[in-house]
Amino acid sequence: MKKYDYIIIGAGIAGCSLSYFLKKESKSVLLIDKNKDVAFGASGAAGAFLSPLLGKSNNFKTLVTEALKFSTDIYKKEFSQFLDNCGTCRIPKNRDEDDKFQSYIPFMDFEFEKFEDGYFFKVGSTIKPYEICKALSSDVEKLFDYEVLKIEQEDDFWIINNEIKANKLFLATGADISLISEPYFDIRAVWGQKIDVKTSTKVDINYHKECSLSKSHNGIVSIGATHNRFSEDMSDSSYNLKLKNINLIDHNEKTLQIMKNDTKELLEKANSIKKLEDIELLDVKIGARASSVDYFPMLGLLVDSKKSFEKYPHIKNGTHIKNENLEVIKNLYTLNGVGGRGFVLSLYLAHNLVENILRDKKLDENITNFRLFSRWAKRQKA
């Protein structure tokens, strides 16, 4: 049985970001994915827009601001060939939104100026999704087209499919959380669609209104993304988390109809930003973004709820137990719940997690799994 210091399951932007920092610490890193290459799920269907979060000061806005500065700095210094820092114009969709923007001005973290019908932020960028995931994970051993059906803990190690052993295991599997049995670890799958179209209209910068419209390159613009949260069973369609290589398969009529409707919606929204002439649809991609119930990421060790309840039964009655006293699942970590800001958040979160594991740097409690357990536990009356 082959053994690694670190194994990462999931080769989207979250998993590739982890591989980028872990390979600096060890040559024994394995990146696994059920798909045939990196960024073949939600990351591949992302527009990968890097844009500030607007609003009054709060913990989530602070997180996004810090992550945007950190990630953009790495993209500029090490991967500038994949970054287009052309700026983004944020356009309010109505008078109420414009009034909100005015109220946010004292709390702006980035420079902006009035531009056309909106406000231009020079920090706004796009990053090429596939290329950056490929570059981040370069020089890391990979195992693709490999479906992980089972992970088991054996002493302090993790065994994958009874075939591969890891000292430490990282789950960056996005909306598919079937490998995690903890009931408090809950993800909302938000299916999004991105389209690439050829147009004779020249677009010089990125725009965001009710959708995002990218700067044109060789007459091609990207438009994204839709937000579909399905309440019904979609296993008879391509909106199925268990499918592999989702954007390479032949879609059935049910899926194609949804994609057709979403394409129409995206084009209408894009045309409310810029009138796109001579449109030719070139590519359509779908993927499930992973969003936590409170929109914050889900990072770090997992609390072992069964053992923690056995040790502290009064947790169910609201008794507060310090995080460090809770029972955790050893050597199993997550980087998940990055939602539609994966290319902003993932590098920052991966860096913080690696620093936490190897150099004992404390993680912000707002982004750890402890907060999820604590809220869930209080609802489990003894």
Image (cartoon, rainbow, N blue to C red):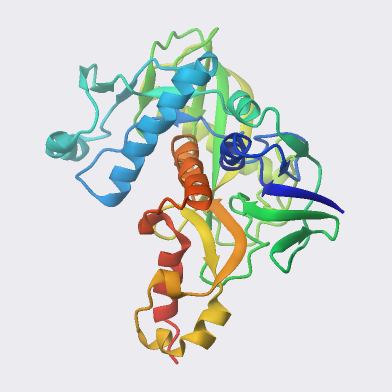
Rendered residue at 47%/74% (across/down): 326
Q: Position of residue 269 (x, y in %)?
A: 41, 30
In the visual, does 381 lie left or right of 290?
Answer: left
Query: For residue 62, what is the image quadrant?
Result: top left
Q: Position of residue 297 (x, y in %)?
A: 45, 52
Instruction: Examine the rendered structure and indicate whether residue 263 appears above or below residue 227.
Output: above
Instruction: Examine the rendered structure and indicate whether residue 180 appears above or below residue 288.
Output: below
Q: How many marks?
A: 0
Q: Position of residue 16 (x, y in %)?
A: 61, 37
Instruction: Examine the rendered structure and indicate whether residue 356 appears above or below residue 261.
Output: below
Rendered residue at 48%/41% (across/down): 351
Rendered residue at 48%/48% (across/down): 359
Residue ranking furthest to the bottom: 382
Quadrant of the drawing holding the C terminus: bottom left
Q: Position of residue 168 (x, y in %)?
A: 65, 54
Which residue is more in the foreground, 355 or 235? 355
Rendered residue at 45%/84% (across/down): 380
